[in-house]
Image (cartoon, grey):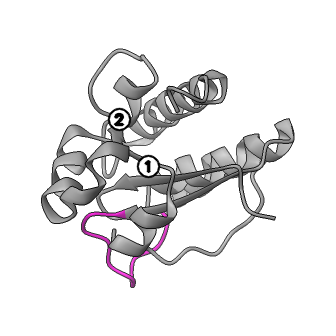
Amino acid sequence: MEPEKKILFVCTGNVCRSVLAEKLLNKLAAERGLAWEARSCGVAAQRYSAASPEIRRILEREGAPPFTHVPQLVGRDLLRWADLTLTMTQEHRRAVLERFPEFHAKVRVLLPHVGLPGADVEDPMGRGDEAYERSARDIKEALERLFSMTSDRF
């Protein structure tokens, strides 16, 4: 069955914020009985990197199933697949649209798109557990708002 809504999350290396958003959205959508599917990628992703252990711990605590992850570089096929592409920062959006301007209409920045304050979900890499927790809270709150958005705003 084709997903009802397809969302692509974009961050820098596709090892932290976008992975968290992808895995958490898929878990929460399944719990709500929604036919939504998320994928993720990065503007500077390198396939030899791994999802951060901090993100794995947060996802485990949230009840997400264990997963294998190979970072993916943002590309035309992924952007074409998505109904909506949500970047973690304004800079990520600029980077995506600089390379793929034809997707302008469906590339948004996560927090502003769902009406939350702040322009960016901060990058927690190398900044300690508190930074990871703050990013995870921001992403989870944004996903909850995304679920409640009407189709015309989606």
> Residue 47 appears at what percent x and percent y?
39, 82
Q: Amino acid at mark 1?
A: Arg
Residue at 30% from the left image edge and 55% from the top image edge: 103
In the image, farthest residue toward the left: 98
Please report contact status of discs 1 and 2: CB closer than 8 Å, yes or no. Answer: yes
Structural distance between the alpha carbons of marks 1 and 2:
8 Å
SS assignment for the magenta stretch, majority: loop
Q: Amino acid at mark 2?
A: Val
Residue 53 visible somewhere in the drawing: yes
In the image, farthest residue toward the bottom: 48
Residue 87 visible somewhere in the drawing: no
Q: For mark 1, what is the residue?
A: 17
Residue at 50% from the left image edge and 65% from the top image edge: 81
Q: Residues within 10 Å of mark 1 (few under 14, many from 20)?
A: many
| Disc ID at residue 121 | 2
Q: Is residue 111 magenta?
A: no
* Boundaries of the magenta span: 42-52
> Residue 6 appears at what percent x and percent y?
59, 53
Left or right placement of residue 30 versus residue 129 in this view: right
Between 23 and 107, the residue placed more toward the observer is 107
Quarter placement of the N terminus = bottom right
Residue at 34% from the left image edge and 39% from the top image edge: 108
> Residue 91 appears at what percent x and percent y?
17, 45
Q: Is residue 49 magenta?
A: yes
| Disc ID at residue 51 | none
> Residue 24 appears at what percent x and percent y?
65, 46
Query: On screen, 119 above or below 78?
Result: above
